[in-house]
Amino acid sequence: MENNNKRVDFNINLAQSFENNIDKGFDLIDYVSSVNVSCTLSGGCPLAIKKAVEYCKFKNKEIGALISLPESVTDPFSLSEEEIEAIVLYQLGAISSFTKAASLNIEHVRPCGLMYQAASQNLGFSVAIAKAIKKYSEWLMLYGAAGTVIKATEADANINIAQEVIINKKYNADTTVDYSVNNIDGNDLLLLRMKHLINNKEIDYAENEFAKIEYDTVHFDVNADGMLDLLKDANNIAEPRPVNYNKVVTSGWVE
């Protein structure tokens, strides 16, 4: 083991599959500390949600709500704050019915897809999501792309946040995600990136070019090739622990 007591939240998405593949990603769950379970607007089916929640309970993993925009929305910035609120609350209610049935609670909310991208680029949109989450529960944490927008959202909406790095996304020099290019392939490259991120708190944006990045959680794409092996290697670099646990440790309240 190389982790030297380094602790970082590792997270994945589950329940984005339909009936013929509802267990997709379950093989990764032992190597992460939090799981974003899909709600109905971000794909999947009710049975997939139910099975994911029950498996997270069995594995004692923190559960978050994975929310998205309806497929009919192509311009997220055309939505009113009231519409954003309705979209968010609808999905939080859906996932919470399953967690309540399992005697669990959701601990965080993570947008995905177009909603994630829009929230990382536009403060008003991000704050609207945060306000909707707070109407549901002031205790929930918002996961979002690491950077100035999510930090400003924390201040403007007075919400707890977790800054996220997506391990197989390309990044710009200002540490924003480059959504215009394909994801990075190859476990050797991703493992080198992971080691540098954990040990130096830097993300590469070009060959041998790095930028400092503040982050709390690392996202692993269950649809990408080789993620199981990458997560196994990542567990040798850092110990996966939920964000709240890590923040309490950093504060000095626990050893």
Image (cartoon, rainbow, N blue to C red):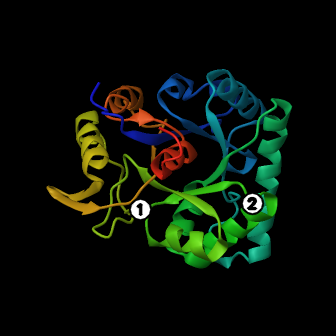
Q: Is residue 220 in view?
A: no
Quadrant assignment, res 136: bottom right
Label 1 Cα crowd, 10 Å radius (few <14 / some 14-19 / many 20+): few
**x, y percent for residue 123:** 56, 76
Q: Report the disc number at residue 188.
A: none
> Which residue occupies the foreground of this view, 123 or 212?
212
Q: Is residue 159 above or below residue 166?
A: below
Q: SS class of the residue under badge 2?
A: loop
Label 2 Cα crowd, 10 Å radius (few <14 / some 14-19 / many 20+): some
Residue tagged 1: 179
**x, y percent for residue 41:** 72, 51
**x, y percent for residue 109:** 65, 52
Q: Is residue 58 in view?
A: yes
Q: Image point 30% across, 54% down: which residue?
A: 201
**Which dot, 2 or 1, sits closer to the camera?**
2
Q: Image point 69% across, 39% down: which residue?
A: 44
Residue tagged 2: 138
Q: SS class of the residue under badge 1?
A: loop
Q: Image point 64% across, 65% down: which residue?
A: 159
Amino acid at dot 2: Glu
Q: How many numbered marks appear?
A: 2
Amino acid at dot 1: Tyr
